[in-house]
Amino acid sequence: MADSALSIRTITESDLPEFSRVVAWAFLDDPRGVDSKWLKVLEHDRAHVVLDGDEIVGTAGILSREITLPGNVLAPVGAVTVVTVKPGHRRRGVASLLMKTQLDTMHESGEAIAILWASEGSIYRRFGYGELATSINRMTMPTRMAFHPGVSVSDTRIRQVTREEAMPFMREVHDRVRRTRVGWLSRVDATWEVQLADREVDRDGLTSYRYCLHPEGYVVFRVKGDGGPRGPQDELHVRELVCETEQAYADLYRFLLDIDLATEISFYTATDDPILHMVDNPRKVSRDLGDALWLRIVDVDRALPLRRYSSDVDSVLEVEDSFCPWNSGRWRFTVKNGEAVVARTEEPADVSLDAAALGSAFLGGVRLSVLKRAHRVVEHTPGHVDALTMAFLSACEPHCPEVF
C-alpha cells in the first residue's frame, strides 16, 4: 500500500528540472538538467510525478507507440519509461502508486498492452509484467570471417554518407521494416534524436556515428580506436542494422566484416539473427543473451484478439491478476484461422496462469510449455498447454532493437 502522505499528478513544464534530477539520481547518474535526451520524447500529459508534500520523490512516463504483433498486426502500446524512486524514499509504495496509475490510465484510454525495459529483474513481475517477452543477443565476432559457400554477396555499392543525407532514407526504410518485425516500435521525430544521440557525452569514448547506406538497408556504427605493435585493432560497435531484403543483410555484413583496420564487430541483435548461420566458423561468434521487453497485458479480452496465431485452439484460461482485477477470472480463448475470440465464461479452466506469464508468452518469445515446467502455468486438462504453446509461436523470434 502507498504511504497516505503521497500524492500523484501529471507533470508541468516547471517540473522538468527536478524531474530530470530525480531520474538521474535514481539511476546513479549525473544530472544534466533539462537538456537530458530522454526529456525530448516525454509526453507531459502521460508523465507522472509522486510527491511527498512538495518534494518530487518518484517519476514515470508513458510513450504512445505502435508495436508490431505476430501476423504483422500494428497495435497501440504504452511504452513505460523513466520509472524512478528517489533514493531515501524506497519501500513506501511510490513505485506501486506509479504503476497502478499508469495501468488505470491505459485501461481507460484503450491501450491493451504495456511494455518496458526493466532496470532490475526483481521489480516488475509483481506488477504483472512478464519477463523475456523479447530477448536480446549481444554478439561479438572477428572481422575477415568468411561466409559459407552458399551465401551470395552482390556487387551493390555501399556508401558512407553524412547524418543529414542518411536520415531521410533511414526513416523510410525503418518504417517499412518495422511493420514486418514482431516487437519493433514506431518512431516519432524525437525518437530518432534520442536513439541516435551523438553528443560527446553519448559516445562513451567512441567516435561519432558512421552512416552507411545500401539501396535496401543501412547500418549505423561507432568505432573504438585501438592500436599497438601489431597495428590497428579497431572495434566496430554497431548501433543499427536495418534491411528490407536478405540480400541487403548479407551485403551489409560483408561490408562490415571487410572494413580495413577493424578487428572486431559487436552488436545487439535478435536471438534468431541469421548471421550465426552465414559465417563459416560460428564458434568464433560469442553470444550473451539478456532480457529486453517486459510486457503487460492491460486488458485480456482486448489484447489477445489483436495478434494472429499459428494454429487453432479452444481453451478456458483462468487468469490471476491482483493488480488489474478486471482481468481476473476465466476466459474462453478460441482461435480459428489465426484469429482469436475471447469471452468471459464460468466453465472449468483448462489452464491457469497469472498476468505476468501471459505477458511473457504474448509475442511468442517464451513458450507456455516452458512456463508450465517452471511452475508458472498449471494445466488442468491434458494437452491444452502444448496446444496453446503452438498457437502463440510465430515464424520469427520477437525482438525490440531499441531501449526507450
Image: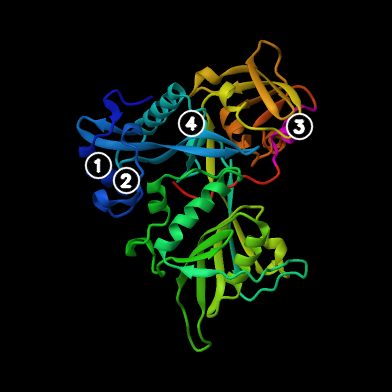
Question: N-terminal of the two: label 3 or label 2?
Answer: 2
Identify which residue is drawn at 80% across, 28% down. Answer: 383
Q: Whole-percent x and y of residue 191?
A: 41, 48
- The residue singled out by tag 2 in the image is 39
Q: CA distance from mark 1 to mark 4?
A: 26 Å
Residues at circles 1 and 2 in contact by the CB criterion of under 8 Å: yes
Badge 3 marks a residue whose secondary structure is loop
Under mark 2, the amino acid is Leu
The residue that label 4 is drawn on is 127
The amino acid pointed to by label 1 is Leu
Q: Residues within 10 Å of mark 1 (few under 14, many from 20)?
A: some
Tell me which corner region of the image, top left, top right, bottom left or bottom right, holds residue 74: top right
Q: Is residue 41 above or below residue 303?
A: below
Q: How many angstroms separate mark 3 from mark 2 (CA)?
A: 43 Å
Q: Amino acid at mark 4?
A: Phe
Residue 402 drawn above or below residue 212: above
Q: Nearer the viewer, residue 373 or 275?
A: 275
Q: Nearer the viewer, mark 4 or mark 2?
A: 2
Q: Residues within 10 Å of mark 3 (few under 14, many from 20)?
A: some
How many neighbours does mark 2 have within 10 angstroms: few (below 14), some (14-19), or many (20 or more)? some
- Estimate the spatial distance between the alpha carbons at disc 4 and disc 3, rounded to whole Å: 30 Å
Q: Which residues fall within the magenta stretch?
A: 383-394
Q: What label does residue 16 carry, if any?
A: 1
Please give the residue where the numbered disc 3 appears in the rendered image. Answer: 311
Judging from the image, the colouring scheme is: rainbow
Question: In front: mark 3 or mark 1?
Answer: 3
Question: In the picture provided, is 218 more to the left or to the right than 335?
Answer: left
Mark pair 1, 2: CA separation = 8 Å
> Which residue is the extreme one toward the right?
382
Decide: is 243 above or below 146. above
Q: Please check the rendered image and state whether residue 197 is part of the magenta-colored stretch, yes or no.
A: no
